[in-house]
Image (cartoon, rainbow, N blue to C red):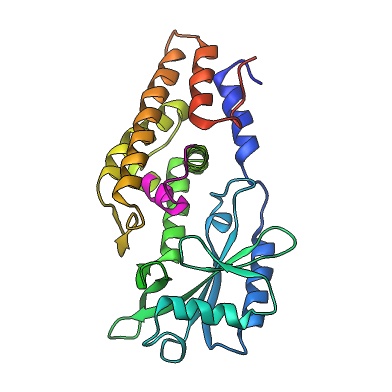
Amino acid sequence: MAYTVDASFNAFYDEINLGGDHRDTANKRRDRIVELLKNDFTILEAYSAGSIPKYTALRGHADLDVIVALHYGKHVKDKLPSVVLQNVRDALSAYRTGVRSNGQAVTLYYDTWPSVDIVPVSRVTDNGGTVTHCEVPNSRTESWIPSKPKEHAALIETASTKCGANFRRIIKMAKEWNRVHSDYLTGYHIEVLALKTFDSNLDDLPWHLHLFFDKARDLVRQRLWHQVSYVDDYLSATGRAEAVKRLETAYSKSLSAWYATHGSNKDHATAIGFWRQIFGDRYPAHG
């Protein structure tokens, strides 16, 4: 519980933030994945990705992604995404696995946190042999999605340096809002929304959270291009409409919450009440 908005946001962040440096764990899991797959696949490159190494993960709701670049001619050419994913599962048949709900990775379950989402990709090169991007399998649509995970992670790091610590805080808080309001958006989509919204110092957390919801409701209404592909192709018409409706509600309530303590206004109880409606039970109540 908290008596001021500042205290409530600090407590909220402590509750949702996955603290600490987990890079050593991520690297060990990556190396183990390579060891398990190397007898069945020619692996050109493997690296950790996802919210954990980008420091945008939520406590209790984060797994580790390991990107595994496979030899195209041997393992990807003329094969459907579902076949490539199944081949990875077959190579791990001695272990408990599953296909991630978005159809883009094989999950290897560990007895201890974190489990690993293995994303088998192919590398795309230009005429000079330079790698331009990778392609991620989508077994739900049997298509390959162009992606630049390393470059995206670099954009997050650059924006965090430019905008300050609140950039990653806002991403995590937006992910928690999404989680408690039916989880229509992917974490990657939320990160891109933040990249499209902010480009300067974020020194007023309540106001900039409101600004995020304001900009996001417009960005989610239409298709959103980022780097080499649309980030929202996974959204159905219904899913997009529902996400926009929830963003509209968050926009309205965040404006009321911000105004309750803006300037000479000191109604922290009302503000905290609105923020708790937006972010759910992990946001502390007033008192």
State which quarter of the image contains the C terminus: top right
Residue 65 placement (x, y as % from top left): 55, 64
Instruction: Write the residue at 58% across / 55% down.
Output: 52
User: In this picture, is 36 found above or below 220?
Assistant: below
| Horizontal side of residue 267 vs 20, given as left or right | left
Farthest front residue in view: 238
Instruction: Write the residue at 34% across / 31% down.
Output: 248
Q: Give the tally of numbered discs.
A: 0
User: In this picture, is 2 found above or below 241?
Assistant: above
| Horizontal side of residue 168 vs 244, given as left or right | right
Q: Which residues are magenta?
A: 181-193
User: In this picture, is 107 found above or below 54?
Assistant: below
Residue 23 placement (x, y as % from top left): 64, 61
Farthest right residue in view: 111
Location of residue 76 (image quadrant) = bottom left
Closer to the camera, 251 or 55? 251
Task: Tell me, yes or no, whether the highlighted magenta stretch contains residue 244.
Answer: no
| Horizontal side of residue 271 vs 143, given as left or right | right
Closer to the camera, 175 or 241? 241
Location of residue 24 (image quadrant) = bottom right
Residue 162 placement (x, y as % from top left): 43, 45
Task: Tell me, yes or no, whether the highlighted magenta stretch contains residue 186.
Answer: yes
User: In this picture, is 65 found above or below 161?
Assistant: below
Instruction: Write the residue at 37% across / 39% down.
Output: 200
Residue 69 placement (x, y as % from top left): 48, 78
State which quarter of the image contains the N terminus: top right
Instruction: Write the residue at 35% across / 40% down.
Output: 242
